[in-house]
Image: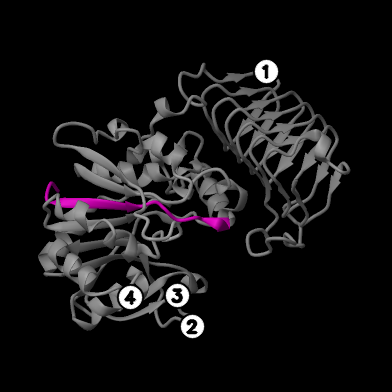
């Protein structure tokens, strides 16, 4: 794999994750207690024995850049190993950022050409999965492809969210539809591509087209150079609040396929003072825990069911946390009840508050496409007053302190913002 260069696209805004990306890039969003989303792509690179990777950043990249550091956590630091962070190249106007996935790679062709390779592996930094890229590259080489797309079957009702391909008996893609309203196949692109380096450079230099899925792949198909690699493992795009929550439920489901520890997923704990050098978790005699993932440094005196807790979370006596994702150093005070809540870092839930209503039928009024299944979002550094009642599909913005609450009640679908 030394002849393959990896490029991780990590610059997207990720707006569908709402307030979770208000202070960070989507690939830097915490996941599974101790990880960040980009850890999956970086760890797959490491576990596939790849030694050179570039991370293309753009939107609010500081926490992402700090997390990646020099790449040592993923064995990507040294004389023959590197992880290179590539910020956007602004043109004559400050707003001249990457216009699409292909444009992002095109603007960094000098980096690719300065590191000779046979293939370039294009990855997304916001997917949760395990893949041995060696197998896909071997397939690409053996079949004589110029471009290979990793593909997997998805439920028919989700096909409008993906690029959809039809393969012949030789795995050649003979038809391609990008996010069709009515698909003729449910074999979907995973956003993972292998290009012959010379072919990709030639394609990008000859055209000004901006997106792989909409432009570059259909052109390669017309040339007969596009092939599909079928993947059958676990993979999930966690770019929406619902998918992010679903993936966490997969993590704690008994017998589930999502298993970062077994996959060899690693993270950079030293980059984050909120995670590094935590004491052991303390579980009091009054605690009750079932089907949950509890990180180091947590103190559990109440009840935690079907939930994921990041380091430093405190659940006080009489408190209940159900089917929720609670990030670093959050306090859930006595007798508070949380259900279907995603809480960002350093939130304070007051005594006796009741947060969430998974049966809520009213979508969020401000962001109906983001929240409609009953999940409630609470932003970083927010403070929930004692005895407050917050419904389902609600959003409490970051930095909402107790004095900013107009009342102690937030009905289903409402948003509290400064």
Residue at disc 2, secondary structure: loop
In the structure shown, which secondary structural element does the residue marked by tag 3 occupy? loop
Q: Which residue is mark 2?
A: 182
The residues colored magenta run: 1-16
Disc 2 vs disc 1: which is toward the camera?
2
Decide if residue 81 is in sight here: yes
Q: Are marks 2 and 3 in contact (CB under 8 Å)?
A: no
SS assignment at label 4? helix
What crowding class fits label 1: few (fewer than 14 Cα within 10 Å), some (14-19), or many (20 or more)? few
Mark 3 vs mark 4, foreground winner is 4
Q: Which residue is mark 4?
A: 215
Residue 355 x %, y %: 76, 43
Q: Residues within 10 Å of mark 2 (few under 14, many from 20)?
A: few
Q: Can you tell which quarter of the image residue 289 is in?
A: top right
Distance of label 3 from label 1 (alpha carbons): 52 Å
Q: CA distance from mark 4 to mark 1?
A: 60 Å
The one nearer the camera, 300 or 43, is 43
As drawn, is 285 to the left or to the right of 117?
A: right
Figure check: 200 above or below 75: below
Tell me whether the residue at label 2 lies in contact with that at label 1, contact meaning CB atoms closer than 8 angstroms. no
The residue positioned 69% from the left and 31% from the top of the image is: 303
Q: What is the CA distance from the residue labelled 3 to the residue labelled 4?
A: 13 Å
Closer to the camera in the image, 29 or 100: 100
The residue at 80%/40% (across/down) is 354
Left or right of 85, for residue 94:
right
Does 315 lie within the magenta span? no
Give how far across and how far down residue 235 sits, in percent.
40, 55
**Label 3 close to label 1 by CB (< 8 Å):** no
Instruction: Left or right? Give the position of 117 relative to 305.
Output: left
Query: CB atoms at circles 2 and 4 under 8 Å apart?
Result: no
């Amino acid at each position: 794999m030394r002849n393959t260069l990896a490029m991780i696209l990590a610059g997207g805004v990720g707006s569908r994750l709402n307030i979770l990306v208000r202070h960070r890039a989507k690939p830097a969003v915490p996941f599974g207690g101790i990880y960040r989303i980009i850890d999956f792509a970086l760890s797959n690179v490491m576990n596939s024995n790849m030694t050179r990777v570039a991370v293309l950043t753009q939107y609010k990249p500081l926490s992402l850049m700090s997390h990646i550091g020099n790449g040592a956590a993923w064995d990507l630091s040294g004389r023959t190993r590197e992880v290179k962070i590539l910020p956007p190249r602004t043109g004559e106007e400050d707003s001249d950022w990457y216009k699409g996935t292909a444009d992002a790679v095109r603007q960094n062709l000098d980096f690719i050409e300065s590191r000779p390779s046979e293939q370039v592996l294009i990855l997304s930094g916001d997917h949760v999965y395990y893949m041995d890229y060696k197998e896909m590259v071997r397939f690409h080489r053996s079949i004589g492809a110029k471009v290979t797309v990793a593909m997997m079957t998805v439920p028919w009702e989700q096909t409008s969210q993906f690029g959809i391909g039809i393969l012949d008996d030789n795995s050649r893609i003979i038809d391609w539809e990008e996010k069709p309203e009515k698909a003729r196949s449910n074999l979907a692109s995973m956003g993972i591509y292998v290009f012959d380096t010379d072919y990709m450079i030639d394609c990008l230099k000859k055209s000004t087209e901006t997106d792989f899925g909409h432009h570059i792949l259909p052109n390669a198909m017309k040339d007969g150079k596009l092939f599909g690699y079928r993947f059958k493992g676990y993979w999930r795009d966690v770019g929406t609040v619902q998918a992010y929550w679903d993936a966490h439920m997969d993590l704690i489901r008994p017998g589930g396929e999502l298993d970062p520890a077994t996959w060899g997923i690693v993270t950079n704990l030293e980059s984050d003072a909120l995670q590094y050098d935590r004491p052991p978790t303390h579980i009091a005699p009054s605690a009750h825990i079932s089907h949950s993932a509890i990180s180091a440094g947590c103190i559990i005196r109440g009840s935690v069911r079907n939930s994921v807790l990041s380091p430093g979370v405190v659940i006080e006596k009489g408190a209940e946390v159900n089917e929720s994702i609670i990030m670093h150093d959050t306090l859930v005070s006595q007798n508070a009840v949380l259900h279907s809540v995603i809480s960002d870092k350093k939130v304070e839930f007051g005594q006796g508050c009741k947060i969430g209503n998974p049966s809520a039928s009213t979508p969020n009024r401000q962001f109906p496409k983001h929240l409609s299944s009953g999940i409630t979002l609470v932003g970083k550094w927010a403070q929930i007053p004692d005895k407050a009642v917050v419904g389902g599909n609600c959003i409490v913005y970051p930095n909402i302190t107790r004095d900013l609450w107009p009342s102690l009640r937030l009905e289903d679908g409402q948003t509290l913002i400064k």
